[in-house]
Image: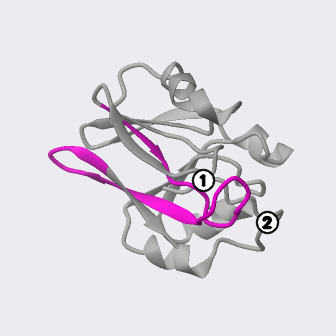
Amino acid sequence: MIADTHIPEVAEKVPDEVLKRFEDVDMILHAGDLVSLDVLKQLNSIAKTVAVYGNMDYSAARSSLPEKTVVEVGKYKIGLIHGGGAPWDIVERVRAEFEHVDAIIFGHTHQPLNESIDGILFFNPGTPTDLRFSSKQSIGIIETGDDIKGRIIEL
């Protein structure tokens, strides 16, 4: 899971460490603010990538990506959205966007979050490139099996 790459505004490309960490994943979910669709080219070269647009994305990304989507992974339904507005109640706002999901992956705040609330995993992987609003760079991994769980990876 990845969000808020802000390429080329903040970095020229997806960091090599991120690409290496994603080498063994089955799918990559990008929760918006790619800025440029070139990010998808890089990520798709590693694994199938599903993305939504965020508030900072260029018009090409906004016109070719959905605002939100639901991805089915095995028996789990995962809501994917960027989010928006003030950070303090973003969990409630993204929750209101989906029904009957097991997890919601979002971005926007640049703050990593990995918390289960009322049986739903709320997961924000943070940002791998941008230190505005965050003191660390990170991505995430979601594992599915008997249950669904997330792991934040600091870079």
Queried whether the magenta region covers residue 129, the answer comes back as yes
Say if 18 sits above or below 141 in the image: below
Q: Position of residue 131 (x, y in %)?
A: 70, 63
Query: What residue sits right under mark 1 in the picture?
Result: 3
- Is 132 on the left-hand or right-hand side of 66? right
Query: What residue sits right under mark 2 in the picture?
Result: 10
Q: Residue at x 81, y 66 (%)?
A: 8
130, 61: nearer the viewer: 130
Q: Quadrant of residue 55?
A: top right
Circle 1 sits in a helix, a strand or a loop, which is it? loop
**Are circles 1 and 2 on residues that touch, CB within 8 Å?**
no
Q: Residues within 10 Å of mark 2 (few under 14, many from 20)?
A: some
Q: Residue at x 36, y 72 (%)?
A: 24
5, 66: nearer the viewer: 5
Q: As shown in the figure, which amino acid type bears the numbered disc 2?
A: Val
Say if 48 sits above or below 111 in the image: below
Disc on the earlier residue, 1 or 2:
1
Q: Residue at x 65, y 71 (%)?
A: 14
User: Magenta span covers which residues?
Assistant: 120-149
Circle 2 sits in a helix, a strand or a loop, which is it? loop
Q: As shown in the figure, which amino acid type bears the numbered disc 1?
A: Ala
Q: Position of residue 6 (x, y in %)?
A: 74, 58
- Is 108 on the left-hand or right-hand side of 92? right
Q: Quadrant of residue 115?
A: top left
